[in-house]
Image (cartoon, rainbow, N blue to C red):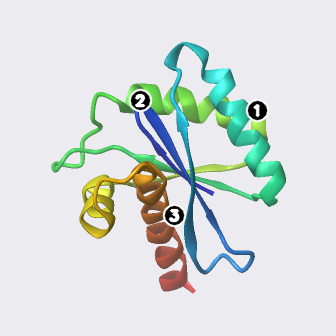
Amino acid sequence: MGIDYGEKRIGVAISDEGGGFAFAHSVIANCSKCATLNVAQIKKICQEKNVSKIILGESLDYKGQPNPVMEKIEKFKNILEKETSLPVIYQTETLTTQEAERIQGKIAKIDASAAALILRSFIEKQNMVK
């Protein structure tokens, strides 16, 4: 599973069973005051789709330094790991939302498309290591 964490929306993507492709899945409204609700929705998707790991977008600036949102992403990561018992791995998300907008235009699932790009980037990186 790939996740693009945003302060307003959380994009979710899923890979195929073989882990070779990434597909936009859904967008969850981010209720920052109710992180457990957000995680419960993600946990449900993990169970339905037999997810074995979560790839979470790491928000860095052009110098490779954490953006201000990284503090919230780190807290979200900790809750995800605790509640899902799955490994949560960071993957740099630099410009994924802009790339998703360029490819698909401004559509409702843009955050899910950005999550798919994060997941695709992770998959490609893993395939290069093999």
At label 3, which amino acid type do we have?
Leu
Dot 1 lies on which element?
A: helix
Q: Nearer the viewer, residue 85 or 11?
A: 11
Q: Which residue is mark 2?
A: 8
Of the image marks 1 and 2, the number of the one nearer the N terminus: 2
Residue at 28%, 60% in the rendered image: 105
Question: In the picture provided, is 120 more to the left or to the right than 93?
Answer: right
Viewer-nearest of discs 1 and 2: 2
In terms of image quadrants, where is residue 66? Answer: top left
| Outermost residue toward the front in this view | 107
Query: Within 10 Å of the Cα at label 2, are there few (<14), some (14-19), or many (20+) other Cα atoms?
Result: few
| Left-right relation of 79 to 13 | right
> Residue placed at 68% from the left, 74% from the top?
16
Relative to 105, 114 lies left or right: right
Measured Cα–Cα span from mark 1 to mark 2: 21 Å
Disc 3 element: helix
Q: CA distance from mark 1 to mark 3?
A: 21 Å
Task: Assess whether mark 2 and mark 1 are in contact (beta carbons under 8 angstroms).
Answer: no
Does residue 80 sit above or below 98 in this rendering?
A: above
Task: Tell me the number on the disc at residue 83.
Answer: 1
The tag earlier along the polypeptide, 2 or 3, is 2
Image location of residue 104, percent across then percent down: 33, 65
Q: Residue at x 28, y 45 (%)?
A: 60
Q: Residues within 10 Å of mark 3 (few under 14, many from 20)?
A: many
Farthest residue, direction left: 63
Find disc 3 in the rendering and name its residue: 119
